[in-house]
Image (cartoon, grey):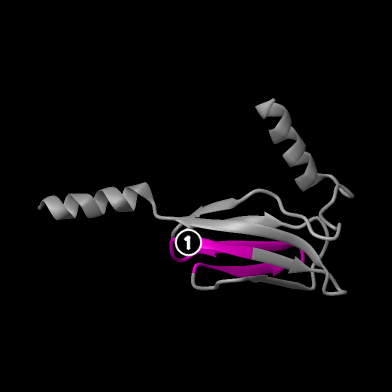
Amino acid sequence: MKYLAHTMLCAVLVLPGTGLNAQSSQIGTLSIIESEGEFVHLEEPATTIFVADPEIASLQVVSNSTVFVLGHAEGLTTLYALDENDEVMMEREIAVHRSLTHMMESLRGVDN
């Protein structure tokens, strides 16, 4: 069942006409490590793309259908993409987490 759900999610991301241009579509939480990023590909071109809290994550617009999301601070925010009619075509939660490597290095510094 888990494999089937993963396959269906991939189909939504790749196949045209599968719902991203519906009224509002949300596809799982995008988890990013602080100071790292991920590309997000939209099924349809957007006219406006933004994050709700730019202190948690920011984005670089690569094209009207691809953005690079960069995590800044631990927390939650939301990525929105709007079409030419200002209709929400995508709403996706972004969770930014601290790196376990960074936390381990911080703990080692406390012991010294």
Question: What percent of the width, then of the height, locates residue 41?
Answer: 72, 56
Q: Secondary structure at mark 1?
A: strand
Q: Is residue 37 visible?
A: no
The image quarter containing residue 54 is: bottom right
Question: What percent of the width, then of the height, locates residue 35?
Answer: 44, 61
For the image, the number of numbered tags is 1
Question: What percent of the width, then of the height, locates residue 37?
Answer: 53, 58
| 62 relative position to 24: left or right | left
The image quarter containing residue 92 is: bottom right
Task: State which quarter of the image contains the N terminus.
Answer: top right
- For disc 1, the neighbor class at 10 Å (few under 14, some 14 to 19, many from 20) is some
Span shown in magenta: 56-78
Residue drawn at the location 27% of the way across and 48% of the way down: 104
Along the line of sight, which residue is nearer the eye, 47 or 79?
Answer: 79
Given the image, on which type of amino acid does mark 1 rest?
Gly
Question: What percent of the width, then of the height, locates residue 87?
Answer: 83, 69
Q: What kind of secondary structure does the magenta stretch mostly adopt?
A: strand
Q: Is residue 62 visible?
A: yes
Residue 33, placed above or below residue 12: below
Q: Which residue is mark 1?
A: 75
Along the line of sight, which residue is nearer the eye, 81 or 36?
Answer: 81
Residue drawn at the location 82% of the way across and 74% of the way down: 86
The verdict on residue 63 being magenta is: yes
The verdict on residue 11 being magenta is: no
